Amino acid sequence: MMTRAIIKAQYSDLPQISERYTEARAFMAQNGNPDQWGRTGYPKAELLRQDVASGRLFAVREGNDIIGAFVLVFGPDPTYAAIKDGAWPDDKPYGTLHRLCAATKAHGVAAFVLDFCEAECKRRGADLRADTHAANKPMQHILEKAGFTRCGTIFVADGSPRIAYQKMI
């Protein structure tokens, strides 16, 4: 078995990372969630380049292959400032996991990423937050299985709702 590692993504990783996001959009569409990323081609190449430049895009590498990607950001997330139909459990500093994707044939990537994010949060004395579309049942299952609590509804930049989660670290 090849060793998995999480690295900060480089510009040279973007072609493989873009392939992972293409696979994720297809997977979501096939599993009843065509709207979260699928209709707009989200995330766009320019956003991924900005993520690399800011050091917040990470790649999950196995051998020479990138089998997953995600964004981890620390500090207040503007989309989390207002929460409806619930509340955040505390005002502790937090990291936010965004845009997690994995190769369709890779197994255990989400759990590997969540372990990494939790360790980073613990190191910084922070909780971990995430959100997902109501139709993204696989991600809801992953977060709930990993001990996240459903906290309410937040709204992303385009005004669409997302289920908000937090794991107290």
Image (cartoon, helix red, strand yellow):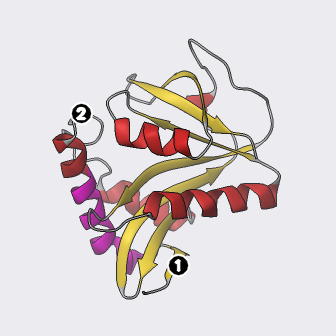
| Of the pair 12 and 33, the residue shown nearer to us | 33
Residue 91's quadrant in the figure? top right
Where residue 10 appears, x then y in whole percent? Answer: 45, 76
Under circle 1, the secondary element is strand
Under circle 2, the secondary element is loop
Q: Is residue 56 above or below residue 125?
A: below
Q: Is residue 158 above or below residue 66?
A: above
State the count of labels: 2
Give the residue pinned by disc 2: 35
Per the picture, the main secondary structure of the magenta-coloured stretch is: helix
The mark nearer the N terminus, 2 or 1, is 1
Residue 154 drawn in magenta: no
Q: Which portion, as a residue range, is magenta?
A: 10-24
Residue visible at 24% across and 33% down in the picture: 35
Give the residue pinned by disc 1: 5
Left or right placement of residue 72 versus residue 48 in this view: right
